[in-house]
Image: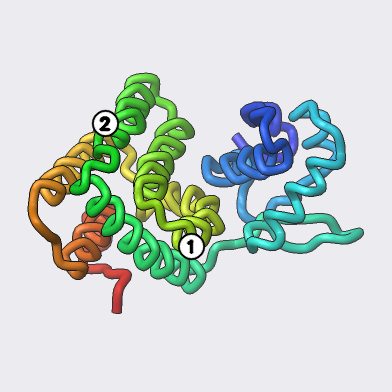
Amino acid sequence: MHGEANLVELPQPKRISLSESVADTIAEAIATRIILPNERIVETTLVEKLGVSRVPIREALKVLHAQGIISGGGHKGYRVAAFEPGITQQIMEVRLSLETFMLRDAIENWRKGQGSPKVLQPSIEMMIASAKGGSLRNSLIADLEFHRAIRQAAHNPIVGTLWDTIARHVLIIFNFERFRDEDLEASARQHEQFRDWIVAQVGKPSTPFRDIQAALEDHMLLIARKKTGDVSISR
């Protein structure tokens, strides 16, 4: 299920911030392997299949190019970038750093009564529903939304903005074989367990920063460690 002809499988973009929605749609297609690494992205095909004009398509492609998700441009057109192991490692390192700060701040805010870890529940429920429906795409999106809920609860605009810039990279990496659990129900359970850990920390006076980082790294690498053994992000 790939190639230009299969772009019909792309979900229709949301009609808010259209160029960003189109960029999200393309990133989702890359994440779910509807569009493959090194595959050519044809602007006219996107216009036809997504039902939007060339302007938001071009803006979306420029955004994805600036973020390194696609390469090329100009008369040669764009292709999906190949995420080499070194690039993947860099993204995971940045993600771990940013999300540790985000989770630290979110936990502290929840301790103060500024919101509640209950905001994580909708994304978990989406994962459960995705598992029942066998939808990898929806499961990946729900996974990202789980971490986005932490980003919102952190109320840290600097770290949050930096995280936003790698969110599409994270979505794509989620579906790399070494990070993906083919059992979508297991993925939902893993997030329930991580949520329970977070709730337990909210009930404590404090949590060491290193413990938050270690818990996040364990969560992020659970599947990779099952498949390949002892791997790590932090050095």
Circle 2 or circle 1, nearest the eye:
1
Where does the C terminus fall, quadrant-wise? bottom left
Q: Position of residue 45 (x, y in %)?
A: 81, 36
Which residue appears at 40% of the width and 34% of the height? 139
Q: Position of residue 64 (x, y in %)?
A: 68, 54
Asked whether 224 or 68 is in front, the reply is 68
Residue at which label 1 appears: 158
214 over 148 or under it: above or below: below
Asked whether 210 or 141 is in front, the reply is 210
> How is the rendered protein coloured?
rainbow
Q: CA distance from mark 2 to mark 1?
A: 34 Å
Residue found farthest to the right:
75
Q: Position of residue 230 (x, y in %)?
A: 21, 68
User: In the image, 32: left or right of 144?
Assistant: right
Which residue appears at 71% of the width and 59% of the height? 65
- Dot 1 falls on a residue whose secondary structure is helix
Residue at which label 2 appears: 185
Amino acid type assigned to the residue bearing label 2 in the image: Glu
Amino acid type assigned to the residue bearing label 1 in the image: Ile
Asked whether 30 or 196 is in front, the reply is 196
Callout 1: 10 Å neighbours few (<14), some, many (20+)? few
